[in-house]
């Protein structure tokens, strides 16, 4: 079965469709290419397991989970050439979709489950695996009815940065030629750049400009701190997001870091005692500590409220999905439409949710025999998973950033409050809450990766039902690999902090340590910082009233400022290159736009690969960032200026690389 190897995506792939226009993918609905094959499923599961094991270890060791989908999409292109019949683009989508679940399931697992070991509650391996499987399945099941809304109805409105990068990798790798060389070139430059700057002491990754007297004075006296993460991955991310989304994202960071942090410091700078939820006096806190101790909770409240708005806006499409299901059920046949718009039957989804709920009830019943507590736990798991599925999908589709830790913290807080009302506390309450948090965390993390996969398939012409079937296989494979890896690591290492008399090596497990402290505090009946969550909720309401996408703004408030500022640079480059493309017009203008997206996608792909290699290096015994150290690294002025200059060089490369054809350097197709 031959693969037509599509030359390029349609011109309207990244733009809103005029009324009455239907998007036509490179692989038409009438075509029947190899998709679900032993090759695609086998390689997908294999890569999923490999990346899951590596991600679990690196995440517990350095707090960073490998983003598997983009590297696996590149591997899929290479694997396609190992067979007499080259893999089709749809087979490569399946490989990427299954393998990409590695990072999402691992994120859900390591953010929560190690906390059980830190609390000395030592879950059984089957319990660990079940928590991941239940959460992953709920994340997929609850997202399927929302697929048409996020993927089709919001076409050209949501930028989908990560899906764009994966799609460009798959399409450009298929057609080869100069465009493939451009993608490989950008990937190689970005991979080397991000690998060096994030793994070794070559030049500063973060620019804080503290060598400038005025900025240093503002930071010391008012806790006004400016920061910038000078890596290529975020530059490419901002380019794909576009100017408007990147500006809104950065505006949220400005409010948090340049308004709320100094405000908290001014009010609390004369207080000699700690103010809850902080643990030390505000006067002794740095800007970063104030952000983590107070302002980030405001961001969590804003994200939760923005998520409510998102749920309300998507209720229509959910109702439509159930309407289609009822119609199909009544007539007794499949009414799901053509191949490229065909989901799993809604009755299958409802049955899956019912089975998941029953299994969760049995699991929770082993922790607490009270029917009321079990029902409350199942209800919380289903409600949070459904609610956060929409939040995660919207966040990933807009900024490629999933607020996993913030939503998990909110789950722990609300679940603890509810269970305390039922009289559940102590170690039983802690296990109960962390199990719920693990399921919800895995659900929202999985749903974020799943919406990326659905959008990639939509752009290329995949069968949604086929993608959805293998998701459950990927969830199972990743859950078993992640669960067993955590159990084995718990036998060899300590999670969190070193215990007295325990000589095992410590894996810091930073996110799980935070969750452990949070659940321990609530089960000890400490007060809740409602005012901080409420302030965030009010900000989200104000954004909606102003017509500003509240979730993007809330994500900007929650994420550290250094992640928002370089995205803004990428957004400006996309804006001005877009203007240049419009002036050029025709094929040449279209070439500018296409080359810009390819280079930006290469920057994201290379940055992801660089992160994978960097994480692998950190697992080498005796690893040290000083293995490669430049003479000027310790000099803040020189190191930060060189970092800024190299980041500017990346911007120049992106600009002139996009304009190369229009400047007269003709290329062969």
Image (cartoon, rainbow, N blue to C red):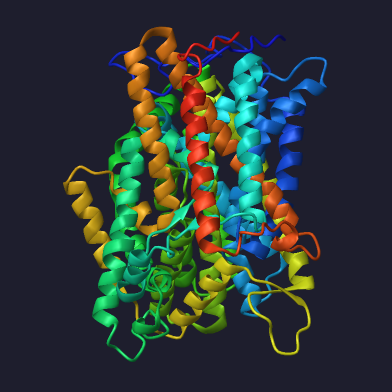
Q: Is 139 left, or right, of 502 in this rendering?
A: left
Q: Is residue 368 visible?
A: no
Q: Residue at x 41, y 30 (%)?
A: 148
Along the line of sight, the residue nearer the viewer: 431 or 361: 431
Please, is residue 471 above or below residue 666 in the view? Answer: below
Q: How many marks?
A: 0
User: Can you give x and y, in whole percent of width and height, for residue 244 in the image?
Assistant: 31, 37
Q: Is 41 left, or right, of 608 in this rendering?
A: right
Q: Quadrant of residue 266?
A: bottom left
Quadrant including the C terminus: top right
User: Can you give x and y, in whole percent of width and height, for residue 241 in the image?
Assistant: 41, 36
Quadrant including the N terminus: top right
Q: Quadrant of residue 470?
A: top right
Along the line of sight, the residue nearer the viewer: 7 or 491: 7
Along the line of sight, the residue nearer the viewer: 64 or 576: 576
Outermost residue on the left side: it is 545
Q: Is residue 572 visible?
A: yes
Q: Is 16 left, or right, of 587 in this rendering?
A: left
Q: Residue at x 34, y 83 (%)?
A: 283
Q: Residue at x 60, y 26 (%)?
A: 183
Outermost residue on the bottom side: it is 272
Please, is residue 647 above or below residue 617 in the view? Answer: above
Please, is residue 451 above or below residue 307 in the view? Answer: above
Q: Residue at x 38, y 8 (%)?
A: 586
User: Can you give x and y, in whole percent of width and height, for residue 254 in the image?
Assistant: 31, 56
């Amino acid at each position: 079965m031959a693969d037509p190897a599509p030359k390029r995506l349609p011109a309207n792939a990244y733009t809103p469709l005029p009324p009455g226009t239907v998007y036509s993918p490179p692989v038409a609905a009438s075509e029947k290419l190899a998709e679900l094959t032993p090759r695609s499923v086998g390689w997908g599961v294999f890569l999923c397991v490999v990346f899951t094991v590596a991600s679990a270890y690196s995440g517990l060791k350095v707090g960073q989970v490998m983003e598997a989908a983009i590297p696996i999409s590149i591997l899929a292109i290479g694997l396609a050439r190992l067979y007499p019949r080259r893999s089709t683009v749809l087979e490569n989508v399946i490989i990427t979709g299954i393998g990409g679940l590695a990072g999402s399931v691992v994120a859900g697992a390591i953010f929560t489950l190690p906390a059980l070991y830190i609390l000395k509650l030592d879950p059984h391996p089957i319990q660990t695996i079940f928590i991941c499987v239940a959460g992953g399945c709920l994340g997929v099941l609850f997202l399927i009815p929302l697929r048409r809304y996020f993927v089709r109805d919001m076409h050209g409105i949501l930028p989908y940065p990560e899906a764009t990068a994966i799609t460009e990798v798959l399409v450009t790798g298929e057609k080869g030629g100069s465009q493939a060389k451009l993608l490989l070139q950008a990937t190689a430059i970005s991979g080397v750049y991000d690998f060096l700057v994030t793994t070794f002491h070559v030049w500063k990754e973060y620019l804080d400009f503290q060598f400038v007297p005025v900025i240093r004075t503002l930071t010391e006296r008012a806790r006004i701190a400016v920061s910038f993460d000078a890596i290529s991955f975020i530059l490419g991310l901002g380019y794909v997001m576009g100017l408007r989304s990147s500006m809104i994202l950065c505006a949220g960071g400005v409010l948090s870091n340049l308004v709320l942090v100094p405000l908290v410091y001014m009010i609390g700078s004369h207080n000699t005692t700690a103010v809850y939820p902080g643990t030390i006096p505000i006067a002794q806190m740095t800007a970063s500590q104030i952000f983590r101790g107070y302002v980030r909770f405001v961001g969590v409240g804003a994200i939760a409220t923005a998520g409510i708005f998102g749920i309300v806006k998507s209720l229509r499409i959910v109702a439509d999905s159930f309407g289609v299901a009822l119609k199909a059920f009544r007539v007794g046949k499949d009414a799901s439409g053509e191949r490229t718009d065909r989901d799993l039957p809604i009755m299958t989804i409802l049955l899956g949710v019912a089975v998941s709920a029953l299994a969760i009830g049995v699991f929770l019943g082993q922790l607490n025999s009270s029917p009321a507590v079990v029902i409350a736990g199942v209800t919380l798991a289903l409600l949070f998973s459904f609610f956060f599925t929409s939040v995660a999908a919207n966040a990933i589709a807009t900024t490629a950033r999933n607020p996993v830790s913030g939503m998990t913290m909110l789950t722990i807080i609300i679940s603890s409050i509810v269970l305390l009302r039922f009289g559940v506390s102590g170690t039983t309450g802690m296990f109960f809450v962390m199990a719920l948090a693990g399921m919800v965390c895995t659900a929202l993390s999985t749903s974020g990766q799943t919406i990326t996969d659905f959008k990639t398939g939509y752009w290329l012409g995949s069968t949604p039902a086929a993608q959805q079937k293998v998701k459950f296989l990927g969830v199972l494979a990743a859950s078993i690999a992640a669960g067993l890896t955590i159990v084995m690591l718990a036998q060899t290492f300590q999670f969190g902090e070193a215990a007295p008399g325990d000589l095992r090596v410590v894996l810091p497990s930073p996110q799980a340590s935070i969750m452990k402290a949070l659940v321990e505090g609530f089960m000890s009946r400490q007060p809740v910082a409602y005012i901080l969550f409420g302030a965030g909720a009010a900000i989200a309401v104000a954004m909606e009233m102003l017509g500003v996408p509240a979730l993007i703004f809330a994500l900007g408030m929650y994420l550290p400022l250094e992640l928002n500022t370089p995205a803004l640079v990428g957004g400006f480059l996309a804006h001005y290159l877009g203007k240049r493309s419009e002036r050029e017009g025709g094929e040449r203008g279209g070439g500018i736009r296409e080359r810009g997206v390819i280079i930006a996608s290469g920057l994201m792909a290379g940055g992801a690969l660089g992160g994978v290699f960097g994480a692998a290096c950190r697992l080498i015994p005796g690893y040290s960032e000083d293995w490669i150290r430049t003479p000027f690294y310790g000099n803040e002025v020189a190191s930060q200026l060189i970092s800024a200059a190299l980041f500017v060089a990346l911007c120049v490369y992106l600009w002139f690389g996009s304009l190369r054809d229009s400047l007269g350097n003709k290329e062969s197709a």
